[in-house]
Amino acid sequence: KPCPPFFSGRFVRAKARAMPMLGLSRGSRAVGSVWRLWVAAATAVGAGVLLALVARRRQLRPRPHDDDDDNDDEPWVGASAAGALREELEEGPELEEIASSTPLVGAANGRTGRGSDGQVLRPRRRVPPPTGAGEALSAEERRPTLPGRQHVYVKTQGCAHNSSDSEFMMGLLQEYGYILTDKLEDADVCLVNSCTVKNPSQDSAMNLVKRARADGKPVVLSGCVPSADHSVIEGLEGVSVLDVSQIDRIVEVVEQALQGNSVQLLNKRRILPSLDLPKVRRNSCIEIIPISGGCLGNCSYCKTKHARGKLSSYSEDAIVGRALQAAAEGASEVWLASEDTGAYGLDIGTNIANLLEKVADSLPPGMMLKLGMTNPPYMLAHIDAVAKILQRPNVFAFIHVPVQSGSDPVLKAMIREYSIADFSTLVDGLREKVPELLLATDVICGFPAESEEDHQGTLDLVKKYRFAVLNISQFYPRPGTAAARMKRLPTSLAKSRSTEVTALFDSYETNSHMLGREERVWFSDTEPKHGQTVGHTKGYVKVVVKQEDSLLGRSAIVRMRKATKWHLEGEVLGEVR
């Protein structure tokens, strides 16, 4: 007989009660029992199929994580269609915010949806393939690409901290199976790690993002640009963004971007990314270690504070451990990086002098240590201790102290929290104890509060100290900063002042006193275009010799043959080690 239209238990029981009332025989009742068993079995099978479908739907639907204590306050927006997500997810928290290629939860008729924090999450439009394109592809080519097999192009801008972040992200991507490429045209996805210090650096990053999108490539924008200003991606489709505190989630973001989703992870974590992450060094000889994130300053022109936030220091043990790991992996130099190395440890009960001593003590023979940028206020308390460490044979005698202006009124308007007298106390104190010290600094020309007298103060400071490295920049008003609200000087005036400072800097050189000397040089880089191997003296003067790759990661005695504005040219004598 055909299957009855109902499978409920009520229907089966009603049919059983009706049998004696109809005068059915005992044999007929036996047949009825068989019928009831068949109906019950069919009911069970149907229920099982229904439960399996429900379970499958729940397995595919993304859900907010509940096992990441660092992101309890991070909103989550899921996609209404699960087909774009991987069927088998790696262990760990899923993405909080996914803008799918289909309408989002909360979106109506395919319109843009909003997350719980008001962020706009736009679904990406898919471009249909040209007619007949599928027929031209082989079955192997039409097969979906396995996650983690695509090529990734990584572009890094900005400071040493940004460079380290990129190396961590490349390490994670490569460990997962992605292939790193140096050519954008060969990439399946583009990662731009951006810098927000100046307008040109941000414009460069955004131009690359637009170029990659014009080529149809998904883009991940990380670094200080999106971290400082969430609005930069408005109007840009197919662009995912990643905060500087969430670089350890780059694999998740790239994977989703390749599947057609636009991901926004912009909430700031309270805990910094681990220093134990895998890494791909741009220069295999140099390990850049971020010792902290953020700073204690409130400079009126600075946008980086909006991105990196307040000071948050890594522990001394974590930094020493990373240095030893780098040494075991073949690195020959350790660079300590931060927005302000002088402020290191003030949030965790230690200081930069203690850290430098511990790292220098831990390094194996032949490995060199280099200190990164520091602002004057917090380094003033450690002049003697830091000078003593810079005298060590395994520490480069180098320090980068941005002065920004030679005028106290301008420094006050910049909210730099020090005076020219403070800067001079720091520099003179270090130079007295470390005569070979190489001093680098930065100046900003054309700041809104800068008068002609203030500008002359900057010129006088450059003449006094004859900085070996001088980074000269015109003032750029960064959106959201206090200085952006100040009345600007004419652009032509700022340009003329920067030109004048540049001319002064070009008028002198600081290397000729080393001609004829024999110095130990630590080699770490190559300039193939000029056929040269590059190294630095103990005082961090750049030295180039005829290219010899076997010198990389080692040191040798070099006689200085020629001095230029930017470097010394030398001849290797021997004692390579």
Image (cartoon, rainbow, N blue to C red):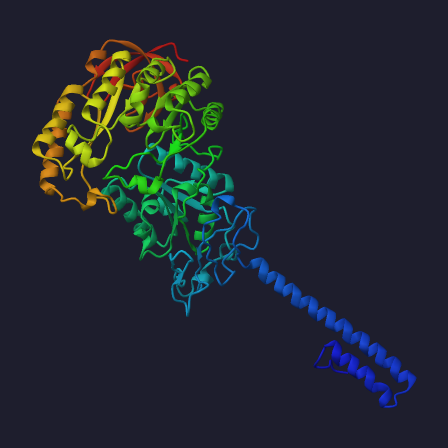
Q: Is residue 375 above or below residue 138?
A: above
Tally of numbered tags: 0
Quarter of the image for the C terminus: give it.
Answer: top left
Quadrant of residue 16 in the image? bottom right
Q: Is residue 469 above or below residue 521?
A: below
View extreme (left): residue: 452
Query: Could you say which is closer to the camera, residue 430 or residue 281?
Result: 430
Quadrant of residue 24 in the image? bottom right
**Residue at 51% over, 42% down:** 176
Quarter of the image for the N terminus: give it.
Answer: bottom right
Q: Is residue 200 left or right of residue 154?
A: left
Query: Could you say which is closer to the camera, residue 30 or residue 304?
Result: 304
Quadrant of residue 315 in the image? top left
Query: Is residue 280 something that shows in the picture?
Result: yes
**Residue at 33% over, 50% down:** 230
**Residue at 24% over, 32% down:** 416
Q: Position of residue 397 (x, y in %)?
A: 31, 17
Q: Is residue 84 left or right of residue 465?
A: right
Query: Could you say which is closer to the camera, residue 379 or residue 145?
Result: 379
Q: Position of residue 244 (x, y in %)?
A: 39, 41
Query: Is residue 468 something that shows in the picture?
Result: no
**Residue at 48% over, 23% down:** 324
View extreme (bottom): residue: 22
Q: Position of residue 465 (x, y in %)?
A: 18, 20
Q: Is residue 339 above or below residue 573?
A: below
Q: Position of residue 493 (x, y in %)?
A: 9, 38
